[in-house]
Image (spheres, rainbow, N blue to C red):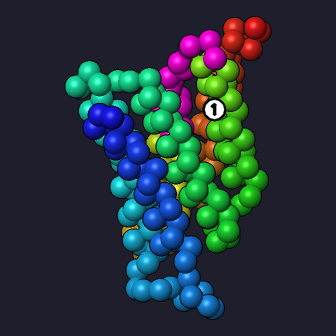
Amino acid sequence: MNLPNRLTLARIILIPVFMSFLLLKVPKGYTLFPHQDLVAAVIFILAAATDGLDGYIARRRNQVTNLGKFMDPLADKLLVSAALISLVQLGEVTAWIAWIILAREFAVTGLRAIAAVDRVVISASKLGKIKTITQVIAISAILLKDWPLSLIGIHIGQPLLYIALFFTVISGFDYLLKSRKLLRK
């Protein structure tokens, strides 16, 4: 269990903490304490930032492991899924967008599982990394209620979510095309 894998595990552990701050409300929608939503957003952003950090450390220290190759994308999927489901519950994201994003995540995870049976590790592609970055940026903007741009009437969260949706679909097709050989067996 090296440092990059510990950071990935920390990202997974932060998910219920993030969800607690985002979703735990007292009756009638009041928050438990001031700026509760901001704390949830900061936790999400910090958890998402560990993704780049764990990969950087793993490559720099030559500590890339099969466990890390498996756990890192899984941690990303769990974090994004938790955020999207929570935002659907809060009425901030429409269910059909969340469904498409989650369906892609399940499909890619399934492809990775099939590959793992043959001892093949499917690493994240560049499109997959772009997909993750755009999802994190969109979700962060929505969690922050488009702050600080909302102060001047600019709302970017929803448009960014459509950009993330585009990269989600494109990267999903990319994984399918690259996995054709595995699916033929």
- Relative image position of residue 181 (x, y in whole percent): 69, 8
Determine if the magenta segment contains residue 76.
Answer: no
Q: Looking at this view, name the residue that lies furthest to the front.
A: 1
Is 175 or 15 nearer to us in this picture? Answer: 15
Circle 1 packing at 10 Å, graded few (<14), some (14-19), many (20+), is some
For the N terminus, the quadrant is: top left
Amino acid at the residue labelled 1: Thr
Give me the residue at 38% from left, 50% from top.
Answer: 10
Q: Looking at this view, name the residue that lies furthest to the left.
A: 61
Q: Which residues are magenta?
A: 117-132
Give me the residue at 53% from left, 18% from top.
Answer: 121
Disc 1, SS = helix
Give me the residue at 38% from left, 64% from top.
Answer: 42
Give me the residue at 44% from left, 78% from top.
Answer: 36
- Relative image position of residue 53 (x, y in whole percent): 31, 40
For the C terminus, the quadrant is: top right
Q: Quadrant of residue 147?
A: bottom left
Q: Quadrant of residue 131?
A: top right
Query: Residue under circle 1?
Result: 109
Determine if the magenta segment contains residue 118.
Answer: yes
- Relative image position of residue 77 (x, y in whole percent): 56, 43
Residue 109 appears in the rendering: yes
Q: In this image, 82 relative to 169: left or right?
A: left
Q: Is residue 65 above or below residue 29?
A: above
Q: In this image, 48 relative to 131: left or right?
A: left
Residue 174 appears in the rendering: no
- Relative image position of residue 17 (x, y in whole percent): 45, 65
Q: Is residue 118 above or below residue 96?
A: above
